[in-house]
Amino acid sequence: MKDEEIESMRKVFNNLKDRIEPLVKSPKIQALQKRVIDIRKDAIDNNEELLAIAMKSLKENDIDCFYAKDDEEARRILLDLINEEIENSNIDKNEVYIAKSKSNTLREIDATQFLEDEGMTIVETDLGDRILQLKKDDNSPVHPTGPASHLTVYDIAKIVNESMNLDLPAEPKPIMEAVREDVLSLLEKSSIGLSGTNSIAAEDGAVLMVHNEGNISLVQSKKLHIIVAGIDKLVPLLEDCVSIGKLETAFATGKPLTSYINIVAGPSKTADIEKKLLKNMYGAEKVAVILLDNGRKEAIKECLWCIGCGNCVVNCPVYNVVGNEFGYHSYLGGRGVALSKYLKDNKGSVDSGLYMCTLCGMCTENCPVLTPTNKIIEDLRNSTQKDGLSREQHKKIRDNIKEKGSPY
């Protein structure tokens, strides 16, 4: 990230703090926080059982459900589903447009790059993600719910004008309207929607997604709606999903509630004619869920508590200096570093910033579910050192102490 982008990101983060801090100190949100902590801990403790229940419940709700052991298998299943739809709907393989919403899990498996390599056109429907997509180079997100928070309105106007051959002023509303018009025109060509999820109610066989823009409603209305989610997103009940969505919104945006909460518990259907069930009304004719392991079963439980609000990076002193260099894929900051060991390996955690962390604990202090990220990172450092992966500077200090009795 450029220095000016980091400075812009800090300003946005400071504004976020001003909104978030008063709200999360309210008795109402603190009571919700206690409830969600219990929900997440219990869900991760019983993840294997919830996975079996979810697979059964989703299928009972006429949702095709798949388990993927790793990213490669998830991409294979994803491609098979899309190719089946292409064949069944007689879609020109050179004209495949996929409407996509924001998803860390889809970034984790490199879904966009993979599908583009297959000749498909991915249309990001979230405004921030679409801006980064139009930016093309150096376009990684900096916050889970505000991916383009490091770009000023002048930066964004330049990106949009150059990519769409326009001459818009550096003002938010005309930029939003231009991007919206462009996205909607592309979505007319799409019959496939691709999304992640905030949480999945295993017993109800339902998937919950929160958003402000209304874009997920567009994505899930496509003929085929594919949802990719980590198995850590499983909780027992829909009520649990709603509680998590509300708490995530508070800690991510400083608002008590998001504009939209979408629940998917099956394809589109109606029974308005003589109470006879008919499928394929307005929404998706087919819904498929891919539940992804990709190292999660091997991860320590605390790594999986996260609800994805991003408040840890907003308050992280390291992240506020180096930006998204500290983290792994779209799992930003210390939590991403900790998770990368299991999504990749020990070297992955070192490369994503294991030794950048100051172990100050600000991430845990500002985490809605109190994930002990600094403690996890400290333990990971011990593990990587045993593998001989400590930093060269540290090795030099160690050797000096051994040979000279001094680090110098």
Image: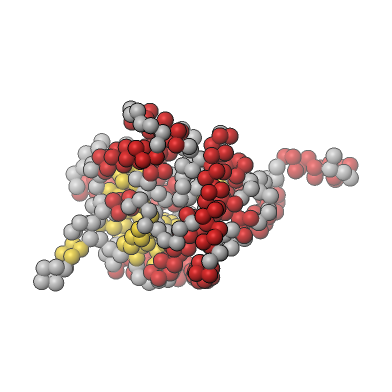
* Residue occupying image coordinates x 22% and y 46%: 87
- Residue projecting furthest to the right: 405
Rendering coords of residue 242 (x, y %): 41, 66
Rendering coords of residue 137 (x, y %): 46, 33
Rendering coords of residue 102 (x, y %): 40, 49
Quarter residue 405 falls in: top right
Above or below residue 7? Residue 66 is below
Whether residue 56 is visible: no
Rendering coords of residue 224 (x, y %): 26, 52
Question: Is residue 20 found left or right of 389 in the rendered image?
Answer: left
Whether residue 157 is visible: yes
Looking at this view, is 224 or 29 the one in front? 29
Q: Look at the image and tell me in which quarter the N terminus lies.
A: top right
Quarter residue 163 falls in: top left
Looking at this view, is 382 or 143 the one in front? 143
* Residue occupying image coordinates x 33% and y 29%: 166
Looking at this view, is 265 or 349 the one in front? 265
* Residue occupying image coordinates x 46% and y 42%: 148
